[in-house]
Structures are given as structure tokens and as C-alpha cells.
Image: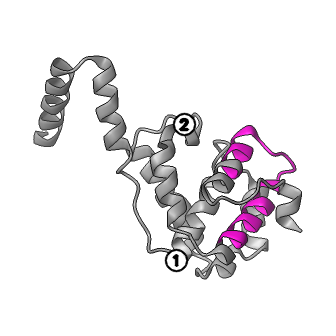
Amino acid sequence: LRLRVSNYLLFYSLFRTYRWASFNQYIDLFKDTAMRTYPRNSPEAAARIVAIVLIADGHVCHSEYEALKQLNVARDLGLKSQNMPSIVQTLCEDLLMEGFNGRSILSHIGDGVMASLMAEVDDPRLQSKVLRVAGAVVQADRHLSEGEAAMLDAICRHWQTSPVTVLELTH
């Protein structure tokens, strides 16, 4: 209860002191710091990027989840098979802690957070593997949603790779 009261007081003091535009800038500052970090080029960092693509359209269908298992994504990324679901769960928890409301993940996390997540994987071979795996997973349901396409495009932009089609990713 004390934590809720102190959060309310912080919110109230910020709200009273600053106009909405200024207040939203402060909220954006807090939003850019909430995601957990993983060691650079770690299996967990790579798996989280696959997980971001996996949930980019707002849900994970059964065929996408099955593709993760059939492709042995966890093993390819250096994880134990039981760790991939926990990476997805941790990502979802981080998004919920930031107040994610189910709309576009890209617009929610912002460019700063996206850049820091992409910076955790800077090995070109690992980046290529992540893109290949992510492409195969989004193809599993035979539908490339706007969210998935936008997320793949953002990843290519941040890693400064040429834009690719999903078909190129899986071949």
C-alpha cells in the first residue's frame, strides 16, 4: 500500500508540475528503461528477438509454436529446449510492466528500446541465424501480418542489413 501511495504522489506531483506534453516525455523516459538486458550475443538475447517477431502480431498461433519446436530454434540459438517459452514469457512480462496494451509492439517500445535490444546481438552470423529463424516462424501460419512485417523491417534497419523478404529468410 505504501508503494502505491508513493507512486500516486509521484504521479500527482509530476502531473501538477508539468503540462501533458512534458509529462508524456517523462513517461517515455521511464518506458525506455524497463526491459531486461541479456549479455551481448547470448542465446537469450537472440531468442528474445525471435520472440519479439513471434508476438509482433499480438498472438502466437499453434503453428508458429510448433515451428519453434520442429526447427529446434532453442538448440540452434544455444538454448535448452525448455528455455524458449520462458524467454517469450519474460518478454511478455517486460511488455506488461511497461503498460503494453496489445497494440503495435514497435510503437509501444519505441526506437530507443528497440535499438538497445538489437545492439545485444551484433555478431553478423548470429543476426543472420535470428533472421532466418524468425522468417521461418512467421511463415508457419502462412500469413505475414503487418506487425510481423514491420518488426522484421525494423530489425533489418537496426542491424543495417538489406531489407529481405520472408522467402529469402528461410532459403
- Across and down, in percent, residue 16 comes to 16, 18
Q: Is residue 79 above or below residue 58?
A: below
In the rendered structure, the answer to whether residue 61 lies left or right of residue 155 reads right
Label 2 element class: helix
Label 1 element class: loop
Residue 107 has which mark? Answer: 2
In the rendered structure, the answer to whether residue 61 lies left or right of residue 83 reads right
Instruction: Let me know if residue 60 appears in the view.
Output: no
- Across and down, in percent, residue 153 comes to 70, 49
Q: Residue at x 56, y 76 (%)?
A: 43
- Across and down, in percent, residue 146 comes to 74, 38
Quadrant of the image containing the C terminus: bottom right
**Which residues fall within the magenta stretch?**
127-152
Residue 128 included in the magenta stretch of the image: yes
Q: What's under tag 2, amino acid-wise?
A: Ser
Instruction: Let me know if residue 21 appears in the view.
Output: yes
What separation in Å lies between label 1 and label 2 (alpha carbons)? 26 Å
Q: Nearer the viewer, residue 153 or 67?
A: 153
In the rendered structure, the answer to whether residue 117 lies left or right of residue 131 reads left
Please give the residue where the numbered disc 1 appears in the rendered image: 42
Q: Residue at x 12, y 37 (%)?
A: 6
Q: Crowdedness of circle 1 by 10 Å Cα count: few (<14), some, many (20+)?
A: some
In the rendered structure, the answer to whether residue 22 lies left or right of residue 83 reads left
What main secondary structure does the magenta stretch of the protein show?
A: helix
Q: What's under tag 1, amino acid-wise?
A: Ser
Quadrant of the image containing the N terminus: top left
